Amino acid sequence: VSELARLEVESLQGATVVRVIGEIDLSNASEMLDAVIKAVPSHETRVVLDLAATSYLDSTGIAMIFRLGERLQYSRQQLLLVVPKQSPIRAVVELTDINHAIPVLDAAVEASEPE
Amino acid sequence: MATLIYLVFDPATRRVRFANAGHPPALVIGNGSTSYLADGLAPPVGVTADDMYVEVAQDLEAGCTLLLYTDGLVERRGVSIQDGLDQLRLEAGQHETSDLEELCDRLLAVFVEPSQVADDVALVAMRPVSVTEESLALSLPAEPRMLAQARRTLRQWLRESAVAPTDENEIVIACGEACANVVQHAYGRDIGVFELEARLVGAAVEVSVRDHGEWRAPTERGGGWGLSLMRSLMDSVLMDRSPVGTTVTMRRRVELGGRG
């Protein structure tokens, strides 16, 4: 997507996982938003944005995630975030209260649907 | 005929560049492994007509010690030079955490018998340390693509100043927000610069970000999350506005020396 980050997309049971590997800041946040939306099939009901390999996320990135959540809600798709407890971006996620709007999980496996 | 080893060490990159004309190899002691800089060996000075020496580079990890010495240290009657080198490597490896004076005293005690010294002996030991008094000063174009570079440079300086990883990470986040603010809001159509400075003040890190743009109220400057992150992650955030620009100065108490 940019020099700072790349995406990996994987279909889990009942969810599409989009992994962001690298850094998200002012320089690439809007590109990331477009790329994530493009990566999600329209029939998918749950989208997991996996930030376990995201080493930096600034407030523009947080705004991008809020926008992504709104866009997906519009098409009746649910967004979940994965941010492990020891992640370097955990503080940003907690301090901006994004978990009040979008569920934050510790690991992507929790996002797959129970049998 | 003379042997010579010539080294240049750059503390910013921790890179050693060297050429070796027939001298016993420099020894790198530390981080659980001790090994010779064996590459780049060429004949002694004055042996060949066309003097060609290969330059070799190697990174010196933080906390490592570089040992240079003359052959008198490892050459003894009845002992092959290879055995001498092997002994030196083993002996020095046991003292990777000793201070340099102690290391040299120890090596001299083990390898040099005063009654049997056939050659003179010289030892040079070097262990790079972070110069904590040193401050960081950086000036970059106020463009989004420069933000990552500002963060990387700050991160490296914090590491070299032995700031603990949690402190490092959260200072980088707060400072990244301050820099992004300038890039996003301080200048109109022209691209100015932003200046980033960091220094240690006792057990605190002080970071300042300066621009020469027009003052706008924090709320207009994306002051929502950015500013609240800065305030949450730092002990103090001061904004100093003047007609010629704005300086954001932030401080945070940190744990030092946490990296061993």
Image: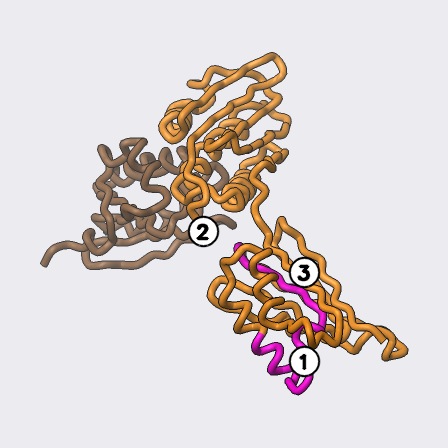
Chain colours: A brown, B orange
**What residue range appears in magenta?**
B62-87
Mark 3, residue position: B124
Q: Secondary structure at mark 1?
A: loop
Q: Local crowd at mark 1 within 10 Å, few (<14), some, or many (≥20)? A: some
Comparing marks 2 and 1, which lies closer to the viewer? 1
B87 shown above or below B32: below
B258 shown above or below B36: above
Q: Amino acid at mark 1?
A: Arg
Point out residue B156 in the picture as x, y percentages from the top left corner: 53, 45
Closer to the camera in the image, A18 or B148: B148
**B17 inside magenta stretch:** no
Q: Are marks 2 and 1 in contact (CB under 8 Å)?
A: no
Mark 2, residue position: B260
Which label's residue is closer to the chain start, 1 or 3? 1
Point out residue A107 in the picture as x, y percentages from the top left corner: 24, 52
Q: CA distance from mark 2 to mark 1?
A: 37 Å
Q: CA distance from mark 1 to mark 3?
A: 20 Å
**Is label 2 on the same chain as label 1?**
yes
Chain letter of mark 1 equals B
Q: Are marks 3 and 2 in contact (CB under 8 Å)?
A: no
Point out residue A92 in the picture as x, y percentages from the top left corner: 35, 36
